[in-house]
Image (tube, rainbow, N blue to C red):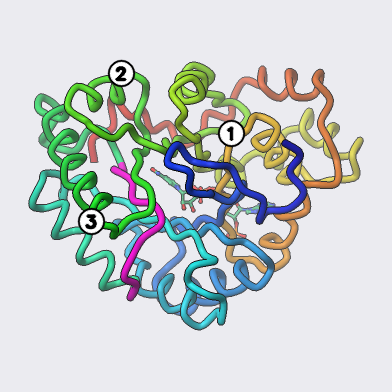
Amino acid sequence: MKLTSIRDTYTLANGKKIPCVGFGTFLTPDGAETVDSVKEALRIGYRLIDTASVYGNERSVGQAVRESGIDRNEIFLTSKLWNRDQGYESTLEAFDRTMKALGTDYLDLYLIHWPIGKGHEQDWAEMNRESWRAMEKLYRDGYIGAIGVSNFMPHHIDSLMVTATIPPMVDQIEIHPGLNHTQAVEYCRTHGIIVEAWGPLSQGRLSQMPALNEIAGRHGKTVAQVCLRWHLQRGIVPLPKSVTPSRIEENTRIFDFELTDEEMDFIGHIQGPVGSGADPDKVAH
Ligand code: NDP
């Protein structure tokens, strides 16, 4: 399928549509900066907004959505269950708080944020299964359009599937040049799970790489645009974050050029920068 704009969509396993590019809000402080950047993103055409309870900015994201003047049903709103809220009852309660903070009565996508929480290094599998049971209930009750996971590697998903009755529809993982996660991406593809890339620009660290600058120059594009195009051509949904209007717009101009197979391959073999260094199996927040 040829993608032509950030509002083009992929189809999730349950038939719901997900935009092919999203907008990130990690580290954007609650208040004017979140309200302004999310409104600007919506004005420019982004329709997928990614937040999480642990970001502390759901209230402002919700305000931006309401003030945007865009119909709520045209916006694909995502939030995430934080580690300390894992468990059946606590997931239901955390979801309720998220809905109140966002000021909405349904969520398009709800994700388990991280597979292993602090203090749950031994019983993480049970914790995920209990949280998932709650998410399946919320989904069946019609409060959530789609449910998924984040930072789950194949073995975490396999473990979840021991008791799950609905497979995850999305896995949001850290991906950028230097961190391909080829195996996880391939696993998701074969299991009908759409992959979202967090840190798609490696938090802005990639701009310095000479090899990427050379490819960008060849196409008359910026390094950020080349990175985002690389995700698109891998069939991955990137979630670039920016509070800078010119960059919010720049990150949407990725549909008027194509990376060659050689360039895709070259970018896929870049070593480093290492990214956040957050290993889902080792980092237990
Ligand atoms: P990104 O890779 O999106 O990088 C964001 C940084 O890049 C910011 O400093 C931004 O600066 C800068 N930037 C944005 N556009 C450009 C550009 N065109 N040129 C140069 N620099 C640019 O990192 P994030 O960590 O924010 O990841 C994206 C989103 O993924 C998050 O916001 C969040 O929604 C999600 N996420 C999910 C996680 C998870 O565990 N599930 C973990 C981390 C993130 P500025 O804002 O100053 O313009």
**Residue depicted at 52% across the width and 28% down the height:** 274
Percent from the top left, x then y, of residue 51?
A: 41, 58
Q: Which amino acid does label 2 sit on?
A: His
Q: On the rendered image, what quadrant is the C terminus found in?
A: top left
Label tally: 3
SS category of the residue bearing label 1 = loop
Q: Nearer the viewer, residue 69 or 248?
A: 69
Residue segment shown in magenta: 103-113
Q: Which amino acid does label 3 sit on?
A: Asp
Q: Nearer the viewer, residue 84 or 275?
A: 84
Q: Upstream in the sequence, badge 3 or badge 1? A: 3
Q: Upstream in the sequence, badge 3 or badge 2? A: 3
Q: State which quadrant residue 268 falls in.
A: top right
- Residue at which label 3 appears: 141
Percent from the top left, x then y, of residue 193?
A: 45, 31
Residue at disc 1, CB closer than 8 Å to ligand 1: yes
Q: On the rendered image, what quadrant is the N terminus found in?
A: top right
How far apart marks 3 and 1 lie (CA) works out to 36 Å
Residue 73 vertical position relative to residue 140 in the rendered view, above or below: below
Q: Upstream in the sequence, badge 2 or badge 1? A: 2
SS category of the residue bearing label 2 = helix
**Residue depicted at 90% across the width and 44% down the height:** 220
How far apart marks 2 and 1 lie (CA) works out to 21 Å
**Label drawn at residue 176:** 1
Q: Which amino acid does label 1 sit on?
A: His
Pointer 1: residues within 10 angstroms few (<14), some, or many (20+)? Answer: many
Q: Which of marks 2 and 1 is in front?
A: 2
Q: State which quadrant residue 26 falls in.
A: bottom left
- Residue at which label 2 appears: 155
Q: Does the magenta stretch include residue 276?
A: no
